[in-house]
Each structure stands twice: as structure tokens, then as C-alpha cells.
Amino acid sequence: MREATLPSLSGMRFCFESLDAARRQRGEALDRMGFGPAASPSTILLDTPALRLHAYDAEPAGLPALIVPAPIKRHYIWDLAPGSSVVRHAVNEGLRPFVIEWKDPAGEVNALGLDDYGARLIDACMDAIAARTGKPAAFLFAHSLGGVFATTYAAWRPTRTAGLVLIETPLHFGADTGAFRSLLAMTPPAQQITRSFSSVPGSLLSMASMAASPTTFALERYADLMASLPSRERLQRHLQVERWTLDEAPMARRLFEEVIDKLYRGDELYCGRLTVADTTAGPDKILCPMLSVVDPHSRVIPPASILAFQEAAASPRKQVLEVTNDQGVGLAHVGALIGSNAHRRLWPQIFAWVRETGMPAAA
């Protein structure tokens, strides 16, 4: 059995390493064609083996906002181009944004899990932000799996979290897992997958997403391309998103195992059983204001996976906003971040909510 298994594992590694290399080459080709990101200038406020923290020129008195991207996606989707940038919009609205850039896991970073990504690493960023701004609390803005990290941090450090702004963030799993539920039912325990890799390849994660919802990750993207062809602006944005999807990042081995087994399969966060650092995280520990954005048509993050947690949260102030359909977004799941309708209608409401909420009295 051992002699048959080792070549198989080696073959899997070679296969996914080759796929990752091919994706990088396609991305570099799109860069040369002018479809790479056009990010805002930033300075590096913190640099660790697991992350970099970007700071942007903004009004010094502005409310600090820490953006927490998903760990399997590159951070620049929050700052894709001048007309499709949450970062620039935040600066124009008087906020002071900071963005986490998760690094590709290597060496000891592969042993980091939810304790780190959902608590200690964010806390190190908050320390750096507090030193820069003089304000010990900040709003947390997050998308998708990044929102799980932001939520667990808010449960762990409630006095440092001025408010949560969660964009299509799944927080309740089980029957509300959505398109990934059937895929999870067919896959082995996470450790049987990770034993083949030092970190989980981006191409494997992309393949899993495609298998879970080919409509979302293939057919809708093609339909968006066709709809974008008449508009140069929409086509440019679509191809920039396509280039971003080729930048799928690998995931730390332990983090992958805990996300699959503790969150998706165990639903520990919603049930209040998720242990993060020295705290048990659950909806009852969320004491800050909370705003959630849902896509009523999403197969990947159905509204029920968001709203059930928000209803159970102890937050004294809650709001739900819906994202509307957009063209030129490539992948509907990121439309709330880069869509023209989102920046015209959704984000002004989000920033108004942040201003009205302000900093908590404890800060």
C-alpha cells in the first residue's frame, strides 16, 4: 500500500503545481494586455511571514477601517481599479482604510489555523493601526471567508471592534451551506486531502469551487462576458476580474482543515462551540454593530447562511442590505466589491451606516 500511495501523492502535487504555473502564465499574459490591477499607492505598515498590512493616504481624523480579504483570494479585489475600488471610495468618504494582504503560506505558516487568522494576526494589525491612528478600535470590513475571520475576531476582542461590515459572508453552515453542501458530502476528511500538500494549492480550491457550482463559476462568467462586450468599460472590468481569478492563492494546511471540519462540517461558529485563542466564539459574543450584505440570488453564499447568524447575534444594532445585479463583474460573488451599481448604490449606504455608527463609547 505504501509503495502505491507515495507515487500517487507525488503525482497529485505535480499535477496541481503544473496547474498553478499555467494559471500564473495566463495571468501574466493578461497583465501584458493591460488587464492587471490598477491599485492605489500604499505603504506597508506591518510585514510578517503570514501577511502584509497596507496603509493608504487618507484624512488623519477619519475612522479607521481594516479590510480583511479571504485567504484564498488576492487582496487587490478591494482596490481593483479607480472606478471599482472600495479602498478609494472609503478614502473619498473620509474613512482611513487599511488592507491585509495574506501571503502565500510557507514553512511554519502552514501550521497556523483559525486561532491565528481569526484572532492573533488580526490583533497584530489592530496594534499597528492603533499606533498609527491613536484609536484603539476600528471597523472591520470583510468579504466571504474573510468575514468569518473578522467575525471571530469581533467575538474575541469586542472592545477593539467598532463595527462589522460583512459582504456575503457565510456564518451558518449545515443545511444552509449552499452549493458546497453536496461537494462536502462526497469528499473525505480534510486531513486526507492535506496529507498530499504542504499547503493546499489554489488550483485545487478553484477546481472545488467549479465542481460545487459550475453555474456560478463557469456559465454565469461566460454570460457576463457576452453581456459586457458592448461596453468597453464593462469588458475591461470583466477581464480584470478574470485576471484576478487566476491569482487564486494557496491556503495554509491547518487553516484548510479547520475551515472544512470546524466551520463547514461542524458549524461550530454558529453553534457557539468554536474555540478561538482563549475564547469560545459564537453569535452571543458579537457585541458591536453589524451590517451584512446579501445576494438574494446567490447559490454559493445563500442569504440563510448569513441572516441566521445575524439574527442570533447579540449586537445592539443590525442592518441588512441587498446587492443588485451588475454587469462586467465576471464573478457575481465579487459584484458587491467592484460593480458599478454597487459603488453607486450599495457603498454610499454602507459608508453612511459607518458614519452614523461611529466609534463605540469604549474606544
Image (cartoon, rainbow, N blue to C red):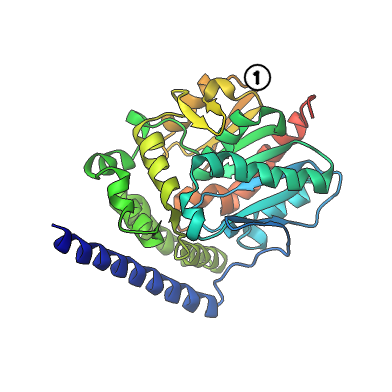
Name above or below for residue 214 compared with residue 30.
Answer: above
Q: Is residue 6 above or below residue 64?
A: below
Q: Is residue 168 visible?
A: no
Q: Quadrant of residue 268?
A: top left
* In the image: residue 208, left or right of residue 270: left
Image position, residue 118 (x, y; %) = 55, 40
Task: State left or right for residue 210 relative to residue 2.
Answer: right
Q: How far across and how far down the image is residue 179, in percent?
A: 32, 42
Residue positioned 42% across, 39% down in the render: 301
Quarter of the image where one finds residue 284 = top right
- Residue closest to the eye, 161 or 342: 161
Quadrant of the frame with the C terminus: top right
Identified at 69% across, 38% down, the residue is 139
Q: Position of residue 20 (x, y in %)?
A: 39, 68
Up the image or down, 116 lies above or below 308; here it is: below
Residue occupying image coordinates x 40% and y 63%:
226
In which quadrant of the rendered image does the N terminus lie?
bottom left
Q: Amino acid at mark 1?
A: Pro
Element type at mark 1: loop
Label 1 neighbour load within 10 Å: few <14, some 14-19, many 20+: few
Q: Depth check: give the residue in front, 123 or 230.
A: 123
Q: Position of residue 184 (x, y in %)?
A: 28, 41
Relative to residue 150, is residue 358 drawn left or right? Answer: right
Q: Which residue is mark 1?
A: 316
